[in-house]
Image: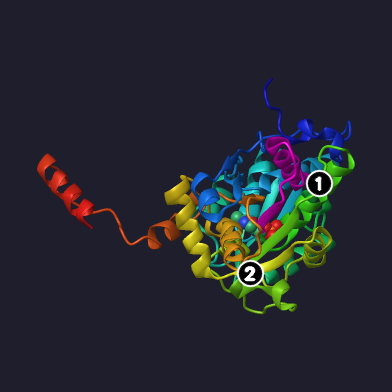
């Protein structure tokens, strides 16, 4: 049967009423890919929930389809968000689909090229501010409180509702809840949504257990780990360059209630994991996404796992979102040679000798 998107597929679990438009770009239904080599190396059963294969290339589509459908149902004409890039791409796409206006606020010079391109081509009004994401979100909250504009950041509860469907899919694809769910943490909406999803599915008898939630912030933006907001967050993983997560308390709750933890990874660990999953497993995810597998590698070294447990790592966004990082993070740029068979063969020999 043709896949009909999240609102239809999970209608019974979502705030979908007869008045809710069944908006869709066929979001969700993303693959759960087993990490063959890393499972052996880490002595774990590792899977990637490859959210980069959503229509705009990130998990944000799950929450955005729900939030935009509800905005349409309520008669809203305009949506607005602050974003490190992926939320704005998703908001812009679904606004285009649903004939709404879309305004996005982004931190100047700190969003990946692909994400900026998306927001622009889908027709959003894109405004860059001098401040960071946290400041952008404050401004969006102020404006949407005063004007008839719908806020579509993850503080909008419909976003969390849509995003929780990823947990349902994980359970259905694996045939059970995994022992651990590893996930990057930025504004902390997604870890909140997964935990809500796992609990709801469990309560409905769809799984017999719950995973331990292990969330990872980037070291330069580890507000939750430190226990205080970070004024000037910094990380190569611009998607999670956030110093004051909006869903802080519910992220801590997800970790505590599940018996997991919120930890952190360094930029170096992120980039190592990023290159490893691409070159060893054939999966290209953006740097922020790699925080999940980087975190699992770190905890493995610290002796956190017994061995053999199932671990699902959420790969939140596609690698093509941020092509500049990919090119910068490998030593070998393409070699330029003359257009003859001989020159190409010589170049191959030189590369093989390296
Ligand atoms: N991974 C990616 C690729 C993201 O874009 C984000 C968040 C996260 C992880 C963290 O998820 O915020 O729910 O904890 N990006 C937001 C944005 C902030 O504006 O696109 P979170």
Q: Crowding at label 1, few (<14), some or many (≥20) Cα neighbours within 10 Å?
A: some
Which quadrant does the N terminus fall into? top right
Q: Residue at x 70, y 41 (%)?
A: 170
Image position of 77 (left or right of 241)? right
The foreground one among 316 and 354 is 354
Mark 1 and mark 2 residues within 8 Å of each other at the beta carbon:
no
Q: Crowding at label 2, few (<14), some or many (≥20) Cα neighbours within 10 Å?
A: many
Q: Position of residue 219 (x, y in %)?
A: 60, 73
The boundaries of the magenta stretch are: 161-183
The foreground one among 91 and 334 is 334
Secondary structure at badge 2 equals strand
Which quadrant does the C terminus fall into? bottom left
Looking at the image, how many numbered discs can be counted on the residues? 2
**Residue at label 1?**
209
Select label 1 or label 2 by which is in front. Answer: 1
The single residue placed furthest to the left in the displayed view is 342
Secondary structure at badge 1 equals loop
The reply to whether the magenta stretch includes residue 257 is no
Q: Residue at x 52, y 66 (%)?
A: 269
Q: In this rendering, is residue 350 above or below 341?
A: below
Q: Position of residue 313 (x, y in %)?
A: 63, 51
Q: Is residue 138 visible?
A: yes
The foreground one among 349 and 29 is 349
Q: Is residue 153 visible?
A: no
Q: Quadrant of residue 93?
A: top right
Q: Earlier in the sequence, mark 1 or mark 2?
A: 1
**Residue at label 2?**
264
Q: Quadrant of residue 10?
A: top right
Q: Residue at x 66, y 56 (%)?
A: 182
Q: Position of residue 279 (x, y in %)?
A: 42, 50
């Amino acid at each position: 049967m043709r896949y009909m998107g999240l609102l239809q597929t999970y209608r019974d679990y979502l705030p979908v009423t007869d008045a809710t438009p069944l908006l869709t770009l066929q979001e969700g239904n993303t693959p759960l890919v087993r990490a063959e080599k890393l499972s052996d190396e880490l002595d774990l059963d590792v899977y990637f929930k490859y959210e980069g294969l959503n229509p705009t290339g990130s998990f944000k589509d799950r929450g955005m389809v729900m939030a935009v459908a509800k905005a349409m149902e309520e008669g809203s004409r305009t949506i607005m968000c602050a974003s490190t890039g992926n939320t704005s791409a998703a908001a812009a796409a679904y606004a285009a689909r649903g004939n709404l206006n879309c305004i996005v606020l982004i931190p100047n010079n700190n969003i990946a090229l692909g994400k900026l391109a998306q927001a622009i081509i889908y027709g959003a009004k894109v405004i860059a501010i001098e401040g960071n994401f946290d400041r952008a979100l404050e401004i969006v909250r102020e404006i949407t409180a005063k004007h008839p504009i719908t806020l579509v950041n993850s503080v909008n509860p419909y976003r969390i509702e849509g995003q929780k469907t990823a947990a349902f899919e994980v359970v259905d694809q694996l045939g059970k809840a995994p022992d651990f769910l590893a996930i990057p943490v930025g504004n902390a909406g997604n870890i909140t949504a997964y935990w809500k999803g796992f609990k709801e599915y469990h309560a409905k008898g769809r799984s017999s257990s719950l995973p331990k939630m292990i969330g990872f912030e980037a070291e330069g933006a580890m507000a939750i780990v430190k226990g205080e907001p970070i004024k000037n967050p910094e990380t190569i993983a611009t998607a999670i360059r956030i110093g004051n997560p909006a869903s802080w308390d519910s992220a801590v709750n997800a970790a505590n209630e599940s018996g997991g933890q919120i930890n952190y990874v360094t930029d170096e660990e992120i980039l190592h994991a990023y290159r490893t999953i691409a070159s060893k497993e054939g999966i290209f995810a953006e740097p922020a996404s790699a925080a999940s597998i980087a975190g699992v590698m770190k905890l493995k070294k610290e002796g956190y796992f017994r061995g053999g447990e199932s671990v699902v790592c959420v790969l939140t966004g596609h690698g093509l979102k941020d092509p500049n990082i990919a090119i910068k993070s490998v030593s070998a740029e393409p070699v330029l040679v003359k257009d003859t068979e001989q020159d190409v063969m010589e170049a191959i020999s030189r590369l093989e000798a390296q």
